[in-house]
Amino acid sequence: MLAVFDKSVAKSPEALQSPNNETAVSALKDGFLANRFSSTHSGSVTINLGSYGILSYSSEIQNPLLPRLFAVVDDIFCMFQGHIENVAHLKQQYGLNKTANEVIIVIEAYRTLRDRGPYPPDQVVKDIHGKFAFILYDSTSKATFLASDVDGSVPFFWGSDSEGHLVLSDDADIVKQGCGKSFAPFPKGCFFTTSGGLRSYEHPRNELKPVPRVDSSGEVCGANFKVDAETKKVDAGMPRVGSAANWSEHF
């Protein structure tokens, strides 16, 4: 799976952008990275999000223990890889039928947050037990929702291209082709939203501290993000106005 998002919907963390990164390119220009992805992933499908980015998905060459899934519901696009252990519980929690799979559960969890927001986003992701990574894009509200499990069980990488667009994929080589040295594994146990940026759902009250990654040649290569036990976030609450309030505008 591959996603490239314009800065207006997913701002790349500054710490992810390596200095003197001459090998990065514009991932969106002329469909560069989507074309690279399709050339190495047979049967891939690319969805053009207009000026907001692209999504590419392939069901070929899968790990049977960590399958990929894709779905679109009410203009919400989601790519999911992995396996959720508490599927039955989450189906009941979100009022889904027996045929709903993991990707539908993630979409419904997001819709519940967006439209009603009964729980903080960190709790919603924490309630998902298993091995997973997902990329969700809401084309109506122009919002992203990304996450990885606490053990980083599914290969999942992110980076920043030459124009500061956010690139995400389960294929590290694809991310490197677009981002050069400005890439890293997506942080374990974390989620990212358009308005809230990167947060730990295991430790939602703590800030995340970037730690520069250094490659074998001694050059900075993106950053890893670690929970800073000494720094707490200021809890400003989550203002809502009725059931129609959109949590993503306030979190």
Image (tube, grey):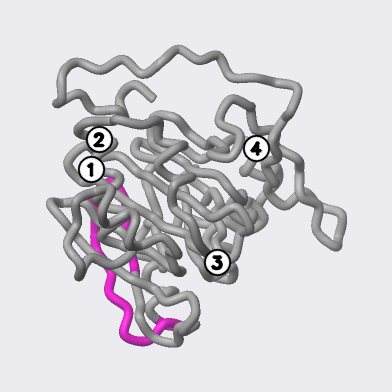
Residue shown at 38% from the left, 78% from the top: 38
Where in the figure is residue 107, as x and y percent of width and height?
Answer: 27, 52
- Pick whichever, 147 or 117, lies toward us: 117
Image x and y of residue 49, in percent: 24, 54
Is residue 102 left or right of 41 when viewed as pictured? left
Residue located at (52% from left, 61% from top): 178
Q: From the viewer's perspective, is the residue at label 3 or at label 4 nearer?
A: 3
Q: Quadrant of the N terminus?
A: bottom left
Q: Earlier in the sequence, mark 3 or mark 2?
A: 2
Which labelled disc corresponds to residue 154? 3
Q: Residues within 10 Å of mark 2 (few under 14, many from 20)?
A: many
Mark 3 secondary-structure assignment: loop
* In the image, residue 164 above or below residue 72: above
Badge 3, how many Cα within 10 Å: few under 14, some, many 20+? many
Is residue 99 toward the left or the right of residue 214 in the image?
A: left
> Badge 4: how crowded within 10 Å, few (<14), some, or many (20+)?
some
Q: Are marks 3 and 4 in contact (CB under 8 Å)?
A: no
Please report the bounds of the magenta region as a residue range. Answer: 39-56
Q: Residue under circle 4?
A: 15
Amino acid carrying mark 3 in the image: Val
As drawn, the label of residue 114 is 2
